[in-house]
Image (cartoon, rainbow, N blue to C red):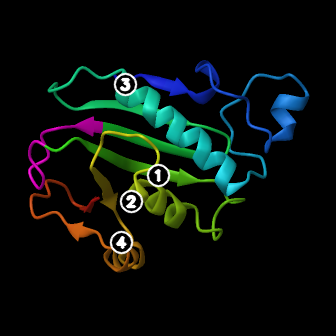
Amino acid sequence: MQEKVLISSLRLPQPSYCTAPIANRRPYDGQMNCTPSVEAELDLFFAWLAYFEASIPQRRNVVTRWYTSPAFQAYTGYSWFKPSTPGEPALCLATILVSSDLRGQGYLTRLVERFRDGKHGLQARVLYIENIASPRFERWLLRAGFQRCTHGTGEFSAYYLVR
């Protein structure tokens, strides 16, 4: 069973973009139901990724966690053993859910740009996106510089980007 770590369980700054749960002092209910800022959400996600990465003993098998916020959810993995990039620290995103409020605002584009620019302080050099079920999304990944994994094991494809 995988551990699900809520963003609210970390000691990160409370997001100012989602007023309903926070302004009413209600705990985050797990629903993706607020109007976020793309940049504010990415700030939280990359802070969480740094926490996640720092909590993983090096050279261990794949470690996975759920990232969950009101705007974005992703089943996130970290490994050094991906067949396409052996020995490289790799971040893997699968089962990506973006709130309807963020869709069409370039969230994934900005996420990839932030990963690629390397200013986030993460050690991971490779970003994997797995379980791609949309041919349109596959085309976007290729245009964004991702390469298709040749070692796919499931019904859906996987792509990776080395920075």
| Residue 7 left/right relative to 89 | right
Mark 3 nearby-residue class (10 Å; few <14, some 14–19, many ≥20) = few
Under mark 3, the amino acid is Ala
Q: Quadrant of the N terminus?
A: top left
Under mark 1, the amino acid is Ile
Under mark 4, the amino acid is Leu
N-terminal-most mark, 2 or 4: 2
N-terminal-most mark, 4 or 3: 3
N-terminal-most mark, 2 or 3: 3
N-terminal-most mark, 4 or 1: 1
Give the residue number, with chain letter if any, for mark 2: 116
Q: Where does the magenta region start and end?
A: 78-87
Closest to the camera, between mark 4 and mark 1, is 4
Give the residue number, with chain letter if any, for mark 3: 54
Q: Residue at x 72, y 59 (%)?
A: 101
Q: Is residue 85 magenta?
A: yes
- The spot of residue 126 in percent (x, y) is 26, 52
